[in-house]
Amino acid sequence: MPELRAIDPLLARAARGIEFTGPTAAAAAPQLLAIGDSAGIDRLHHILALLDILSAAPPWETELLARPWMPPLDKGGTDDLIDDALNYLFTNSAREIKLADVAARAAMSESSFSRYFRRSAGQSFSDTVRKLRLAHACQLLENTDERISTICHRTGHQNLSNFNRQFRREYGITPGQYRRIHQHPELVLANSNPPQPEP
């Protein structure tokens, strides 16, 4: 389809793994979560929306994770193993997730699975868990009025200070600021342009 040619550069770079940060990561997170919660045409809609967001990311919000050449992955069920691991993470993101449990599902040792996951997914297992939980938190901050402390525990974080620290490190703002930006953009805009005093 001609409409999909715009994402060709993104797909070419994706072979090296791309980490998205800042506003792009914040905008993409709800679409990523929605893919795991949907099916059929609805899932395709969220996939295309995600690709549209990522393909428009400015260079300073992307980082390539691997060198231009990587040895080919072993064939035979590799995609199924990663898909199963990611589905497990989606389903259990609010609970304690142990590498040992996911490695056992793949019938691999923890060390072997950890190396395999990093090579296949482009980032470590722990980083994937952390980012998935933060993406879930973004969705709850945007779409619910739950207290931030409740969202903290619903997304598998042990305490509020750790949650705030990780959220700020990933997105550059606090959870409270993220909620105000996405639930009340008119207030953010008004505060960014305060009225000037009369001469």
Image (cartoon, rainbow, N blue to C red):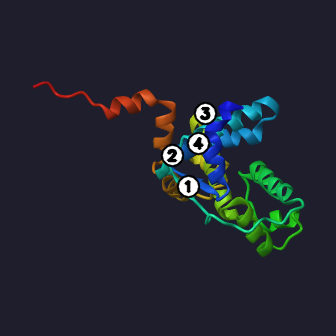
Measuring from the top left, give residue 146's x and y in whole percent.
Answer: 59, 38
Mark 3 or mark 2, which has the lower sequence index?
3
What residue is at 50 percent from the left and 44 percent from the top?
23
Q: CA distance from mark 3 to mark 2?
A: 13 Å
Q: Is residue 138 left or right of residue 195?
A: right
For the residue carrying disc 2, how many other residues have a C-alpha within 10 Å: few (<14), some (14-19), or many (20+)?
A: many
Dot 2 and dot 1 residues touching (CB under 8 Å) = yes
Mark 4 or mark 3, which has the lower sequence index?
4
Dot 3 and dot 2 residues touching (CB under 8 Å) = no
What residue is at 16 percent from the left and 28 percent from the top?
197
Q: Which quadrant would residue 30 be assigned to in this image? A: top right
The kind of residue on which mark 4 rests is Ser
Decide: is 199 above or below 53.
above
Label drawn at residue 143: 3
Label drawn at residue 175: 2
Q: Between residues 147 and 2, which one lies in front from this camera angle? A: 2
Q: Residue furthest left?
A: 199
SS at circle 3: helix
